[in-house]
Amino acid sequence: QDYPLLDEAEYPTAYDHLYSMTDEILASGEVDHADDFEWEFYIVDDDEVLNAFAAPGGYIWIYSGLINFLEYEDEVSGVMGHEIAHSANRHTTEQLTRVYGYSLVADMLLGEGAGAAVGEIAAGLVFLDFSRDNEAESDEFSVYYLCETQYAANGAAGFFDKLLDAGSVQVPEFLSTHPSSKSRVTDINSHAESLSCSTDPYSDGDLQEFK
């Protein structure tokens, strides 16, 4: 399977927007390894796919199809916070080590041949089967992260709401084995409320320009 990436040199405004969003999340003070990992972000040029995935060491991909599907900055931030949590909390490291072995994953973590390693196991990254605990933890940490930013702390819940409203839209591959969207909306909103985080929509962003 091909993973055509938007060239950062050709689409600097889009990548600036993505990095502005993720830099704020990483600066929240809540992200483990915020200063240790590479934290590189890529946009996969495929408008037909709703997906995002993370690799060890802070390498994260989001599809243009998912960006175009969402309506608010908070929803994109919620998805990115969720994927950052998978990487920061080493969920991907644990899963990939089990599938591919320690050596290949160590190369990625150490930044040695990371690009080649990612190319070799990209398909595996897409289809990683995280546990319910991993998913619940990443949802929870997305709230922690966004609580310290200008984005609504329950941004990820807005994403799941959008899926529920869409109804017939195919569930993204990275959600196919996860807890139901409805239960996750409830859990994320409850967590944001318990932490007294702001859930006011971020109104100053320009998601349309990003799209």
Image (cartoon, rainbow, N blue to C red):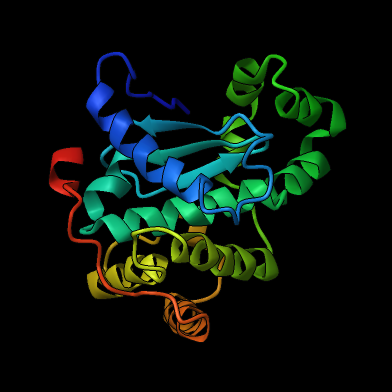
Name the spot of residue 163 as percent of width and height, x first: 32, 68
Residue at (51, 62) in percent of width and height: 142
- Please, is residue 189 above or below residue 55 in the view? below
Q: What x and y, as percent, mark residue 194?
A: 52, 86
Relative to the observer, which residue lies in front, 106 or 178? 106
Quadrant location of the C terminus?
A: top left
Residue 194: in sight, yes or no? yes
110 in relation to 89, above or below: above
**Image point 46% across, 78% down: which residue?**
192
Q: Is residue 132 above or below residue 74?
A: below
List x then y, in percent, for residue 178: 56, 68
Horizontal placement of 183 versus 99: left or right?
Answer: left
In the rendered image, the residue lying farthest to the right is: 102
With 129 as the anchor, is 26 left or right in this view? left
What residue is at 81 percent from the left and 40 percent from the top? 97
The answer to whether residue 166 is above or below residue 37 is below
Front one among 149 and 112: 149
In the image, taking residue 60 as reference, residue 108 lies left or right, namely right
Residue visible at 64% across and 36% down? 35
User: Residue 155 lies in what quarter of the image?
Assistant: bottom left
Give 24 or 183, whichever is nearer the viewer. 24
Residue 45 visible, this angle: no
Percent across and percent down for residue 151 are 34, 61
Question: Which image quadrant for residue 46?
Answer: top left
Closest to the observer, 192 or 111? 192
